[in-house]
Image: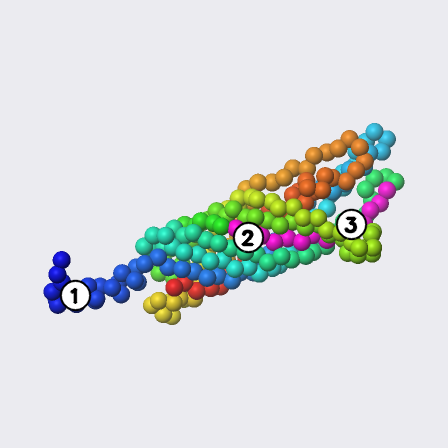
Amino acid sequence: MRLTPLALLATLCSAPLVAEDAPRAKVQLFGERTSFNKSPVLFVVEGGQTYTTEDQPKDQTSWGLRLSLGIDEAATWNVELAVRAKKKSALTYSGPVSPTLTADFTQEGFEYGWWGPGVSYALKLGPAVALSAGLDLRVERLTAFMPAGVVVAEGYSETTIYDRPWARAALTFTLPVSARIKPQVGVEGSVALIRKKVKTYSTTQYVDAEDMRRGLAPQSAFSFFAGVTF
């Protein structure tokens, strides 16, 4: 097919419109506040009665990065990849675990971080506001540790990888400072769709290490984010 000069001019003039409607990419930096689950860490049996001790790590605030790519012309459907940096916090319980025993878990720590792919759908509420819902498959890294010299000279740490789906909802505000590159800010809440229930034992013992780490894993998080779409 031979293009006439008029047809070629029309093709060149329409190219920017096609590029403008193409799927847009997003880069977001977020700060996440994570609250951990309270879960059994020790069972003590005395006089035929079981006493359960629960604990949880202190809340954490860490940063993360999310990359997003629209897969339709309006960028309402997006595929994403995110990572949240690892952060350490101490356990919180110190006190009685039975009528005759006490324990102090505050020198033990918990390190948490995650990464994973996701998908989201954005509903525009106006020219500068969007409400989005998403689903992540997060690969969560849960590490319980104790500093050197507390119980053993060299200290110890044990890690569990926990794969879980998370549901997300976000409110995003876009600042129209440019036709192509636009800053964004927003807030997001997320909840885990799976929770580990720790088993009760009939003898005095610590909870199974894998179960304990999964039991302490967070069930919700809240974040603020800022980024650009282009």
Residue bearing mark 1: 8
Position in image of residue 172 (x %, y %): 44, 58
Quarter holding residue 184: bottom left
Q: Position of residue 221 (x, y in %)?
A: 57, 52
Which residue reaches farthest top? Answer: 48
User: Which tag, 1 or 3, sits closer to the chain's start?
Assistant: 1
* Label at residue 180: none
From this viewpoint, is residue 107 visible?
Answer: no
Mark 3 / mark 2, whichever is N-terminal: 3
Q: Residue 88 vs residue 228: left or right?
A: right
Cα gap from disc 1 to disc 3, whole angstroms = 74 Å
Is 104 on the left or on the right of 35, as rendered?
A: right
The tag earlier along the polypeptide, 1 or 2, is: 1
Residue behind mark 3:
105
Q: Residues within 10 Å of mark 3 (few under 14, many from 20)?
A: some
Q: How many marks?
A: 3
Task: Please name the residue shown 65% across and 57% down the image.
Answer: 87
Name the residue rendered at 68%, 50% in the picture: 143
How much space separates mark 1 and mark 2, taking CA atoms?
47 Å
The answer to which of 104 and 130 lies nearer the viewer is: 104
Q: Amino acid at mark 1?
A: Leu
Where is the N terminus found, in terms of image quarters? bottom left
Is residue 42 visible to the viewer in this orientation of the structure? yes
102 in the magenta segment: yes
Disc 2: which residue: 115
Residue drawn where x is 47% and y is 64% of the image: 227
Q: In the image, which residues are magenta?
A: 101-116
